[in-house]
Image (cartoon, helix red, strand yellow):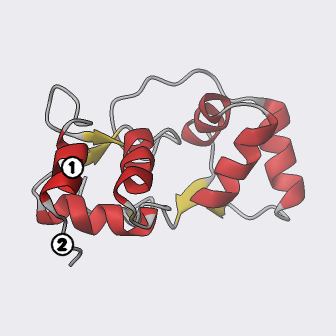
Amino acid sequence: MSKLDNAQKELLMTNLDEDGKLSCLKAFKVARLIGKNPKEMASITSDLGIKITNCELGVFGKLKFKNPNEKVYNRLQENYMGHKKLDCKVLWDEAQKSTLRIVGSTVKNSDIEVTHCQLGVFRNKKDIHGC
């Protein structure tokens, strides 16, 4: 369990959405602001009864996604030897070549499974914790 001081809690609380949840993107921001490793965010938010939501890769949340991008899909398949399970970090790195939304849309609408969330929220797409 990662204890927060009052200033850290305040920074976290001011970044919650109207439903009292913390988006994935804001979870990365908050981790940086409070001096914590992003991997600790799932535990921190869970201890406070806060859910992380709106995964930019479409694993969980209510974000709307577009059609998959064939070039991104093909590049992922080529670069990762056809593996269908790819770490979240790999997909975020791929987003540097396009956008997180394009990669997320491609993953959400394909047979690729996201694993090992950088925020520590889930280990496998089918094994979601805290969301």
8 relative to 104, above or below: below
Q: Pick out the residue farthest to the front.
A: 7
Residue 127, how many percent across, how many down? Answer: 36, 66
What kind of residue is marked 2? Answer: Lys
* Residue indicated by mark 1: 51
Q: Residue at x 25, y 68 (%)?
A: 43
Nearer the camera: disc 1 or disc 2: 2
Task: Please tell me which residue is depicted at 24% across the width and 47% down the height of the picture.
Answer: 12
Q: CA distance from mark 1 to mark 2?
A: 17 Å
Instruction: Identify which residue is drawn at 25% across, 45% down.
Output: 11
Q: Give residue 48's position: percent from left, percent from top.
A: 11, 59
SS of the residue under disc 1:
loop
Q: Residues within 10 Å of mark 2 (few under 14, many from 20)?
A: few
First in sequence, mark 1 or 2: give its number. 2
Q: x and y percent of residue 51 in the render?
A: 21, 49
Apparent side of residue 9 relative to residue 81 in the rendered image (left or right)? left
Residue extending farthest to the bottom is: 1
Residue depicted at x 17% and y 46%: 10
Which residue corresponds to mark 2?
Answer: 3
